[in-house]
Amino acid sequence: MARYVDPRFPERMRMLRRARGLSLKGLYRIAHVSVSSLSEYETGRRRPSAEMARTLDLALDAGGRLAAMVVETPRTGTVEEAEEASDRVAHAVNAPRRIDARTVDALARALAAHRRADDDADPAMLLPAVSAGHAQMQRLASAARGPHTHALRVVAAEWTQFTGWLHAQARHDGEAVRLLTESADQAVQLGVPNLACQAWGFRGFLERQRGVPARITRAFQTATEVPGASRLHRVDAMLNTVHGLGLMGEKRQALDLLGQANDLTTSAGADEVDPVSYWLTPTWLRIPMGMAYLGLDRAGDAAENLRAGLGALPADWQRAEWAAEYRDALTQAENAA
């Protein structure tokens, strides 16, 4: 099993134990877990299994909060590839001037495994490993030489963006803004417009959590203006810009842009799907379309599109942390319709 442990687990466990007035020995009597093991869980020297987290949750009467901080998922080929790639990463760090195509591919697959994990794990659980990988990638990208350097730097820029995305979800706003801005700049320099467009889209997601319509609009509008971005990326950014404009009360401008987005949608095909933006398909566009209508106070249209878009997602995506705002938006639209 692949295991993701929220880095806040030790502190939360210690806080819950103390709140109940228990010593480690007292918790041992309830949970029947050795004092030495309990100490290691609280200091972070040992990572609990999901079963152990449930045992401690029950003993501390945590109501599922502690158990939810440990997630185990079956090992998939992608996760195994990521583990296999770790040896290649270590080798690459020691020999950055001998990067080959297989190394670049392994690093890309390692990042892909983390991206897939984001669909069913708490972002905070992924951050330690992803941040460590990001630091390694930046060192590699800086030191690498040879014919595969550009491809490596593209993967490094993708890693920067994904790390920023996790920070955005975890509401580490300052770090998220820094990393997403950096990844957009890297993407432009490397000539990867879809990556730059996506980085600004993630910045728009963050601004939506902050709840400032002008900033939402500005971020997504910047995404629409990236030269060379695919039609799918542009339509996604345009629809999210419509949502921001609607929240600002700029209805006429929002409706004009919605018309442009609808025209472009008819020519955006599934063949434009970017492997890095694997979720961004013509069907996905029903979700930002729903957000656009919500910003325009057209609750019925918003509910119809959000329901269709969310319903088309794989079941684990529907439950993902990043999908919460869309679930909430659907509830809001249905209540207002």
Image: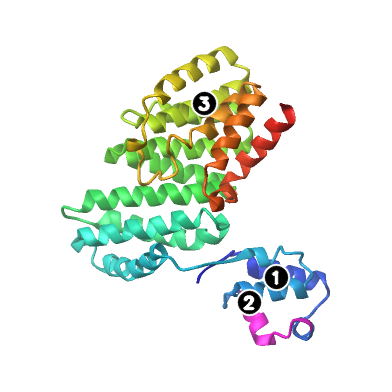
Q: CA distance from mark 2 to mark 3?
A: 45 Å
Q: Which residue is mark 2?
A: 41
Q: Which residue is mark 3?
A: 241
Task: Please tell me which residue is depicted at 67% across the width and 67% down the height of the picture.
Answer: 67
The front one of 63 and 191 is 63
Q: Secondary structure at mark 2?
A: helix
Q: Which amino acid lies under the numbered mark 1 shown in the image of this protein?
A: Met
Image location of residue 13, percent across then percent down? 70, 70
Q: Which mark is residue 254?
A: none
Q: Secondary structure at mark 3?
A: helix
Task: Please tell me which residue is depicted at 79% across the width and 82% down the height of the picture.
Answer: 30
Q: Report crowding for label 1: few under 14, some 14 to 19, many 20 or more residues within 10 A (C-alpha).
A: many
Task: Please tell me which residue is depicted at 32% across the width and 28% down the height of the picture.
Answer: 227
- Please report whichever mark, 3 or 1, sits nearer to the chain's N-terminal start: 1
Q: CA distance from mark 2 to mark 1?
A: 8 Å
Q: Which residue is mark 1?
A: 13
Q: Is residue 215 visible?
A: no
Dots 2, 1 in contact, CB < 8 A? yes
Q: Which amino acid lies under the numbered mark 2 shown in the image of this protein?
A: Tyr
Q: Which amino acid lies under the numbered mark 3 shown in the image of this protein?
A: Thr
